[in-house]
Image: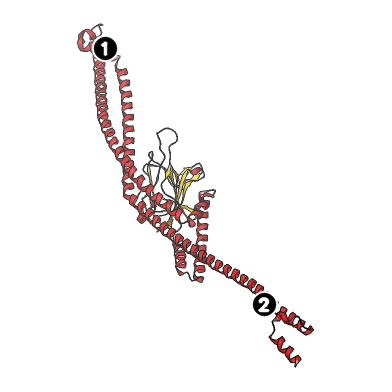
């Protein structure tokens, strides 16, 4: 009975009370302590796991946010690039349109410049003729001066003059004949002097008229020149914006030409650079196709085809209607003997600040200073034909610009008439060979 009572008390007593009994109760207390320590350890481990999970979740969310931001930035850059390409295309089209709009105005300007040059030559000829006539008049007056006193005496006292010294009849007759001949010569010289003086007066009138016409032509020329220059510079600014908005193979082509040692080397380098650009565009098109970006593939392949087809329609004698690229006269014709051999182009002697026109429709490959050629441009006419124009004073086009046949591309330096006269050298190349440009101008 007692033991049973103890058992019941142990079963219903608090845990602390059980620890006061025999050894069995002490072991039970140790087991109870161990049971309470395990949940604390598990809670700390779970907290660490939770922290790690939270950190991983935060890192994952940060990574996702970063990827989304990168995707957003990439899309924004693509949109900006697309806008830049569209802006570049619009500016290039505007430049081409503005260049084409200068064709008629530049043609009229060149006619006016040629008229002014012809008038200037005529005025110079009139001045030269006046100087020659005055010199002739002075010489005739000098020759006639000694005879004038005798002629005057004969006219006043013919008998006394002829009979001042008694002479035989035959000598008197001879004297009369001499006097008659002398008077005839005096009369002829007098008429010549009169005619030359009349011619001088006519020259003075013609010179005054030509100078008046020259002033009107010069005024008209300056007005037309200002109009053409404004239009040409507007086209140049549009092309420069296009080049800045979207760089393409244009810069590589111009850099290749600038590094060249000669014109022939420049043409070779340009063609090599364009060939490489075509290959690069084809590779870009294939890469875009693999990435399923058909829009980029189509654009790259279109640009490659445009480069392969050439920048212009080529040249032919059928479209050679714009005339010489500059007013003035031909100084050296194609094949003419020079110090370095037969001329490989045509050299023009133009008026001061004369406008220069594009000799074909095409694209500017290079525009700027080049070696000893001064300001030079290379114009790709298509089908591997290129015009080289060297010696300009100012260039009104930029590399990559599309120009129309006869459009304004620059002007010659100013020339006052003293010192070396500026000249324009025009060369036509087909690949690596020079061609006579005359039939195509």
Q: Toward which corner of the image does residue 412 lie, by quadrant?
A: top left
Identify the residue position indicated by label 1 in the image: 149
The span from disc 1 to disc 2 (Cα, nearest Å) is 156 Å
Q: SS of the residue at dot 2?
A: helix
Q: Is residue 318 left or right of residue 213?
A: right
In percent of width and height, residue 337 lies at 47, 43
Q: Residue at (51%, 70%) from the top-left corner?
A: 291
Q: SS of the residue at dot 1?
A: helix
Whether residue 146 can be seen here: yes
Front-most of 156 and 423? 423
Earlier in the chain: of badge 1 and badge 2, it is 2
In percent of width and height, residue 131 lies at 33, 26
Q: Is residue 301 left or right of residue 151?
A: right
In percent of width and height, residue 282 lies at 50, 65
Furthest residue toward bottom: 1
Is residue 419 placed above or below 282 in the rendered structure? above
Identify the residue position indicated by label 2 in the image: 39
């Amino acid at each position: 009975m007692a033991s049973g009572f103890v058992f019941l008390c142990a079963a219903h007593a608090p845990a602390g009370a059980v620890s006061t009994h025999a050894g069995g109760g002490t072991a039970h207390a140790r087991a109870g302590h161990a049971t309470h320590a395990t949940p604390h350890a598990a809670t700390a481990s779970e907290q660490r796991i939770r922290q790690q999970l939270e950190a991983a979740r935060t890192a994952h969310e940060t990574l996702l946010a970063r990827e989304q931001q990168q995707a957003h930035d990439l899309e924004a850059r693509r949109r900006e690039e697309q806008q830049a390409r569209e802006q570049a295309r619009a500016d290039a089209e505007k430049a081409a349109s503005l260049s084409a709009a200068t064709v008629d105005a530049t043609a009229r300007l060149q006619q006016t410049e040629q008229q002014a040059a012809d008038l200037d030559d005529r005025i110079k000829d009139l001045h030269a003729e006046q100087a020659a006539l005055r010199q002739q008049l002075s010489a005739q007056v000098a020759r006639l001066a000694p005879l004038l006193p005798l002629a005057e005496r004969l006219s006043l006292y013919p008998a006394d003059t002829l009979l001042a010294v008694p002479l035989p009849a035959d000598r008197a007759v001879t004297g009369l004949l001499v006097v008659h001949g002398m008077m005839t010569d005096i009369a002829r010289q007098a008429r010549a002097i009169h005619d030359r003086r009349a011619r001088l007066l006519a020259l003075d009138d013609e010179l005054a008229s030509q100078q008046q016409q020259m002033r009107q032509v010069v005024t008209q020329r300056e007005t037309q020149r200002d109009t053409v220059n404004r239009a040409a510079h507007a086209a140049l600014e549009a092309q420069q914006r296009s080049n800045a908005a979207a760089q393409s193979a244009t810069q590589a082509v111009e850099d290749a030409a600038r590094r060249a040692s000669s014109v022939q080397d420049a043409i070779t380098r340009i063609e090599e650079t364009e060939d490489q650009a075509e290959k690069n565009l084809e590779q870009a098109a294939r890469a875009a196709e693999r990435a399923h970006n058909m829009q980029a593939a189509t654009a790259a392949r279109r640009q490659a085809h445009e480069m392969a087809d050439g920048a212009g329609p080529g040249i032919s004698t059928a479209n050679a209607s714009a005339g010489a690229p500059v007013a003035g006269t031909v100084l050296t014709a194609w094949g003419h003997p020079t110090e370095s051999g037969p001329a490989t182009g045509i050299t023009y002697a133009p008026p001061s600040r004369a406008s220069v026109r594009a000799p074909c429709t095409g694209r500017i490959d290079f525009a700027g200073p080049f070696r000893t050629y001064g300001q030079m441009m290379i114009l790709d006419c298509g089908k591997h034909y290129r015009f080289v124009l060297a010696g300009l004073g100012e260039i009104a086009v930029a590399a990559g610009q599309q120009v129309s046949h006869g459009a304004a591309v620059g002007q010659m330096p100013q020339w006052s008439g003293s010192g070396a006269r500026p000249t324009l050298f025009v060369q036509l190349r087909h690949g690596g060979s020079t061609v006579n440009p005359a039939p195509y101008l």
